[in-house]
Amino acid sequence: MKILVTGHLGYIGTVLTPLAQAAGHEVVGLDSDLYAGSDYLPLPPMVPALKKDVRDVTADDLRGIDAIFHLAALSNDPLGNLNPKLTFDINAGASIRLAELAKEAGVKRFIFSSSCSTYGAAGDDLLDESAAFNPVTPYGESKVLSERGIAPLADDRFCPVFLRNSTAYGVSPRIRFDLVLNNLVAHAFATGQILIKSDGTPWRPLVHIRDIAAAFLAAATAPVESVHNQAFNIGATAENHRVSELADIVAGVVPSAKVVYAPGGSPDKRCYRVTCEKAEKHLPGFKAMWTAKKGAVELYESYKKIGLALADFEGPRFQRIARIKSLLADGKLDETLRFRG
């Protein structure tokens, strides 16, 4: 199968791309490479790729592609809040347009990286894929708009699939430190403090990026009738944790680290728990294999090997929003977040 991975140079993409190749697929990438130079580990071997903003894709770029793994997006809530209009343009408008072009070009399967943040403020109830959307951030809203815009394109020639990923974690060549488990372990290692920025009560479902990659690969080869125009919560039902529980897990992994609550921490509106049974039932061979504790150990061992310092993950090298602001200030990006020249 020939697969186009948009955002192949990002946090998930740099892990998913080599795993897709290892599974025997021909992989093509598409990425504007906003985070060039922000490498935590060496990048995997390069694949043939288009260095292009996802908003500028044409149907000709997609001809001959069997499936698209659509990861490219402004990837977190701080970035989304920087310019909500751009978040909607890139995460929603460009995603819907890409799906339309894919259908025009004869692409058979379109696997969209959605998010459980679409459930937003949902409280303590365990949610399946029929639960109401209730996003509380531009990022979450953009994923809802994308799903609603792409779903009507489905027909007997075009099969969209929506993977609502739980909160991701894990080591990647283009690591993100804004993600809760990655961040808690980083603070614990670099400072000896496990810094909780909320009151610790919000629920989060968690999933390792390798399990996300496994879900994409399963969705690409699953029988059409199992996945056609369907949404799947990606993760493991047992891996719903309160942030305070995650802090305790990290305390058990990082020697001598102590849990500290940031002054003024308040309840986070983003609070949701999900069940992931549908994915295990309908994505052949898929089962999330990682746990938060196993992930915390992986992260700790990696940070120890690298010698991670506080300035590394709080500065512009690895922090997404700081990197974007730096490129804007240097005039390398225009106001639409496209590279100049």
Image: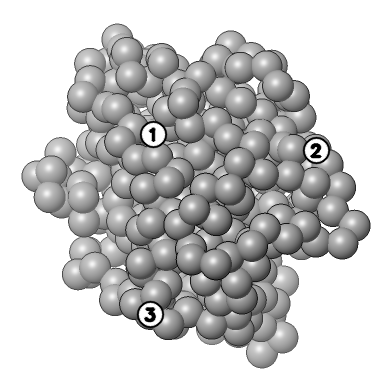
Task: Residue at the far bottom: name it.
Answer: 330
Q: Which mark is residue 306?
A: 3
**Residue topped by disc 2:** 269
Circle 1 packing at 10 Å, graded few (<14), some (14-19), many (20+), is: many
Provide the secondary structure element on which disc 3 rests. Answer: helix
Please state, as top left, top right, bottom left or bottom right, where the N terminus lies in the image. Answer: top left
Provide the secondary structure element on which disc 2 rests. Answer: loop
For badge 3, the amino acid type reads: Ile
**239 lies left or right of 26:** right
In this rendering, the answer to whether 294 lies above or below 161 is: below
For badge 1, the amino acid type reads: Ile
Looking at the image, which residue is at 55% across and 31% down? Answer: 240
Provide the secondary structure element on which disc 1 rests. Answer: strand
Q: Do the residues labelled 2 and 1 touch (CB within 8 Å)?
A: no
Identify the image quadrant of residue 296.
Answer: bottom left
Q: 330 or 18, which lies in front? A: 18
In this rendering, the answer to whether 235 lies above or below 191 is: above
**Residue topped by disc 1:** 111
